[in-house]
């Protein structure tokens, strides 16, 4: 397992955000994490990325506890939900990738941009791009240091259908051709069914983790999932 999470619990002043979650991710996995708003997906990612350290349980990347060493972070590319970009930010796409690169390697920048189909726009300013294009630049930025794992937190929120399809096609290629393991949270069940080989269904506790096909072909499970999502939705409004 390249990621191993055991009994992960997070408590925000008496309110459980995550409750005893355990699962592993094997090399080459494409894991879709699904669950309603407020289910704890972002909290899970914050713990995995070392941004929230006050948790109970263990998180291991590449067999090492993340409390012991932060080295694992150099192997991870992270793409957040729609990033906020200042329209007047003067940097070009190429410059943004150069800033986030550990080694000064122009070829790696070109490679990363080709993988997300943005190489022709390399000298455009980031503020002049559409939201979908910006989000592809953020994948390239995550790829520029050759990560083994890509973590994406609902990356297509607010992006039009054409760019979503393109985005999913890129993720599929990165997983299959580049052999990058992907952990991706999403509300789009159709996309998860199409792309992910594994699914984790989260609602503070983990009520399913396994093969994608098993989850989507289980009518009881699907019914349970939509009922929970509805309750959470009602609860939030």
Image (cartoon, rainbow, N blue to C red):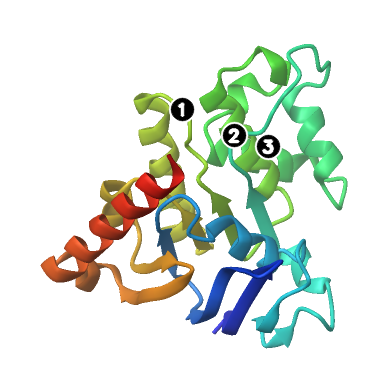
Q: Are marks 1 and 3 in contact (CB under 8 Å)?
A: no
Q: Earlier in the sequence, mark 2 or mark 3?
A: 2
Is residue 188 shown left or right of residue 39?
left
**Above/below status of 48 relative to 58:** above
Is residue 148 in view from this perspective? yes
User: Which residue corresponds to the image point at 72% horizontal and 45% vertical from the top-left?
Assistant: 108
Category of crowding for the residue at label 2, using alpha-carbon neighbours closer than 10 angstroms: few (below 14), some (14–19), many (at least 20): some
Q: Earlier in the sequence, mark 2 or mark 1?
A: 2
Depth check, mark 1 against mark 3: the one in front is 1
User: Which residue corresponds to the image point at 46% horizontal and 59% vertical from the top-left?
Assistant: 175
CA–CA distance in space, label 2 to label 3: 23 Å
Please state the horizontal and vertical placement of residue 106, each as a whole percent of the image.
Answer: 79, 39
Please state the horizontal and vertical placement of residue 107, each as a whole percent of the image.
Answer: 73, 42
Is residue 202 shown left or right of residue 219?
right
User: Which residue corresponds to the image point at 40% horizontal and 33% vertical from the top-left?
Assistant: 164
Instruction: Please give the residue where the numbered disc 2 appears in the rendered image.
Output: 82
Q: Which image quadrant is residue 68 in?
A: bottom right
Secondary structure at numbered mark 2: loop
CA–CA distance in space, label 1 to label 3: 24 Å
Secondary structure at numbered mark 1: loop
Please state the horizontal and vertical placement of residue 88, each as a whole percent of the image.
Answer: 79, 11
Instruction: Please give the residue where the numbered disc 1 appears in the rendered image.
Output: 159
**Above/below status of 136 relative to 50:** above
Q: Earlier in the sequence, mark 1 or mark 3?
A: 3
Instruction: Please give the residue where the numbered disc 3 appears in the rendered image.
Output: 110
Is residue 215 shown left or right of residue 202?
left
Q: Who is closer to the viewer here, 3 or 19?
A: 19
Category of crowding for the residue at label 1, using alpha-carbon neighbours closer than 10 angstroms: few (below 14), some (14–19), many (at least 20): some
Q: Which image quadrant is residue 188 in?
A: top left
**Above/below status of 173 relative to 86:** below
Q: Quadrant of the C terminus?
A: top left
Is residue 187 in view from this perspective? no
């Amino acid at each position: 397992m390249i990621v191993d999470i055991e009994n992960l619990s997070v408590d925000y002043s008496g309110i459980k955000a995550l409750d005893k979650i355990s699962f592993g991710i094997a090399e080459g996995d494409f894991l879709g994490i699904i669950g309603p708003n407020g289910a704890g997906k972002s909290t899970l990612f914050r713990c995995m990325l070392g941004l929230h350290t006050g948790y109970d349980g263990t998180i291991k990347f590449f067999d090492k506890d993340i409390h012991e060493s932060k080295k694992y972070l150099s192997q991870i590319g992270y793409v957040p939900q729609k990033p906020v970009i200042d329209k007047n930010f003067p940097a070009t796409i190429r410059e943004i990738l150069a800033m986030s690169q550990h080694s000064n390697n122009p070829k790696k920048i070109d490679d990363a941009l080709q993988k997300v189909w943005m190489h022709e726009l390399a000298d455009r300013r980031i503020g002049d791009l559409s939201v979908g294009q910006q989000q592809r630049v953020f994948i390239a930025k995550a790829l520029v240091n050759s990560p083994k794992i890509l973590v994406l937190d609902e990356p297509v929120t607010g992006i039009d259908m054409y760019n979503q399809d393109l985005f999913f096609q890129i993720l599929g290629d990165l997983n299959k051709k580049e052999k990058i393991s992907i952990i991706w949270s999403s509300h789009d069940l159709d996309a998860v069914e199409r792309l992910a080989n594994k699914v984790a269904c989260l609602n503070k506790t983990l009520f399913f983790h396994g093969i994608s096909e098993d989850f989507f072909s289980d009518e009881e499970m699907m019914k349970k999932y939509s009922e929970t999502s509805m309750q959470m939705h009602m609860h939030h409004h």
